[in-house]
Amino acid sequence: MAEDAKTPAPPPPPEGEKKPSAEMPAAPVSNAPVKPVAPAPPAKPAVPADSTTPPKPAAPAKPTGPVPLLWSSPLVEKYRSQYGTALEGLTYLGQNYLTVKSELIPNILRLLRDEEQFDYCVDITAVHYPKREKQFDVVWILYSFPRNERLRVTTQIADGASIPSSVSIWPTANWLEREVYDMFGIQFDGHPDLKRILLPDGWKGFPLRKDYGILQQDKEWVQINLGIESGQ
Amino acid sequence: MSAPTGEDTKNISHLAPSNRENSDQGETERKNVGGNDLTFENPDKTYLDSNELIINMGPQHPATHGVLRVILKLDGEKVLGTECVIGYLHRGVEKIAENRTYTMFNPYVDRMDYVAAVSNGLGYCEAVEKLLNVEATPRAKYIRVILTELNRIASHQLWLGTHALDIGAMTPLFYTFRDREEILKIFEKYCGARLTTHAFRIGGCQYETYAGFEKEVKNFLTFVAPKIDEYETLLTTNRIWMERTKNVGVISAADAIALGVTGPVLRASGVKWDLRKAQPYAAYSEFDFEIPVGTNGDTYDRYLVRMAEMRQSLRIIEQAVNSIPEGPIMAKIPKVIKPPVGEIYHSIESPKGELGYFIVSDGSTQPYRLRVRPPSFVNLQALDIMVRGLLVADVVAVIGTIDIVLGEVDR
């Protein structure tokens, strides 16, 4: 409930920096290293130029909105003392999340379930940032029934790297991880049956990657299946 | 299942220890398939020692509520395991979102859970509002609650009719569809659409209520309350219904939580958890209602929970329609929606369970990433443990009781 409370922020100033800062604001706590938190490339990769494309985001000055703040809570303190800077707690618009190094991955999730009662894994998903060195954000959305609290855990992994599966922690991860694999091609080590779930087994490519254009896909499908040059 | 043959007879006779030496090679192989504990103390094992049978149910099967294919591993008529093959209705909703503006994507969400389009729209609009850090106006919130709860009743009515039809009771289908029509008429008058309503806009509602909206909603409340009792007279104490649903498809609370099951399925297992209460959104914190829960986690309890939920929805609508505040229906939001850089997760209690939207904004007019957390998809995963050990006919009952909509499973 607390995390749902909307922070009544004043309307963002109409003009801001040309590029919304992806850096942390000057951290109020001195021991926290300044670290990029928000998605690094704000510009979208080339979207197929069809009529639906809105004006390029770079043209008008972008309003700067609220920025993620450091989240101080006993939970963060506890795991920071254990893992140090490999883990950071942040909060954005009242929603808390942890950014962790990928080496921590099955352990921190297991600890969150066993020690902090995050017994319900709501969702597992990923975000693709093709211009970043570690291209993928993998996101676990957790909920605790006893605490009535949500928490997201985010980690970054490189393209081609794999990440330990959390099926042994939450059985619900089975299909969720399969979907992430299906859409992004991220490998989950130790998953009992990692194969495509929504797309046919013979599908080429991973559609939710940013370099997977819908027009190109549509055209290719038309050419292969209908035998004509273009369906447009 | 194969007819008894001479081999099968021999197979039974090998239960006598004296005959074991006579077993030939083929029999040893078959023994391995069925396991070696073929004794009369193990009545669950088959004596015919038939091989397991793999059959396909669906994707073109009326009881799978769409295009769900379930591969059943059977021993006779007993289910040993299942595997769901999904994706036949996959439209790439999440990819579409990345190529549309926030406003343009709004009608697409109606096509996910197409029997509860209003709920989908509410979840999406609230998630984007959260990302924009704005809130809908009080009047819009009340209209949203009324329409969403009407949609919950419509969704449960459709579920009840089709679920009962699957099990063999045909009458409820006609009753529920007859009464659901009244809700669809209200939707049609409000926004012009019956199923894919697109009722809400980011920031509030596009339409003011039509003249006579309150009166029609109130008329509907007095009309439908006795109808819900009528459905119950057909089923609740019906001997066949009880035989077909009690102790069928049982899922414990611990299993349900581990599998991420939400909605009426979770509540029927005894977990008193409803997002409308746990983390209230829209105007739900202002209304008085209860969370119905079950005890056994079986198909019958899930039926009772949904019946009770319809009555609770009526309570909510009644309170809301009597106190719709005056005021604007749209909050002040910019014409071009450009949320600041950031990520947000927002979820609501849809008729099927927790419907969540995880949106990543890069500051442009299009979502950088939009993830839908569909309740049907996650709940369907529990089918396997719910049907193990049951008969094939019960699989139909369990698919019905989970209440999936394939448009939402596949997206």
Image (cartoon, coloured by chain):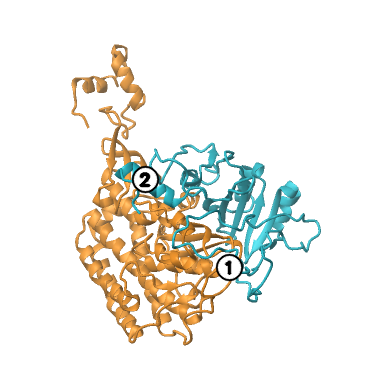
Chain colours: A cyan, B orange
Q: Residues within 10 Å of mark 2 (few under 14, many from 20)?
A: some
| Amino acid type, mark 1 | Asp
Residues flagged by tags 2 and 1 on a common chain: yes
**Percent from the top left, x then y, of residue B7?**
22, 20
The extreme right residue here reads A30
Say which element carries label 1. Answer: helix
| Amino acid type, mark 2 | Trp
Image side of residue A194 versus residue B111, left or right: right
The residue closer to the viewer here, A165 or B170, is A165
The residue closer to the viewer here, A159 or B212, is A159
Q: Residues within 10 Å of mark 1 (few under 14, many from 20)?
A: some
**Which chain is home to disc 2?**
A
**Percent from the top left, x then y, of residue B63?**
26, 51
- The quarter holding residue A161 reads top right
Q: Is residue B234 visible?
A: yes
- The quarter holding residue A76 reads bottom right
**Percent from the top left, x then y, of residue B274?**
47, 64
Say which element carries label 2. Answer: helix
**Which chain is home to disc 1?**
A
Label annotation for residue A4: 1
Label annotation for residue A221: 2
- Residue drawn 58% across the image and 68% down it: A4
Q: Is residue B390 visible?
A: no
- Residue drawn 57% across the image and 51% down it: A139
Dot placed on the residue nearer the N-terminal end, 2 or 1:
1
The residue closer to the viewer here, A143 or B327, is B327
Query: Alpha-carbon distance for marks 2 and 1?
Result: 43 Å
Quadrant where the image shows the N terminus of chain B: top left
Q: Are marks 2 and 1 in contact (CB under 8 Å)?
A: no
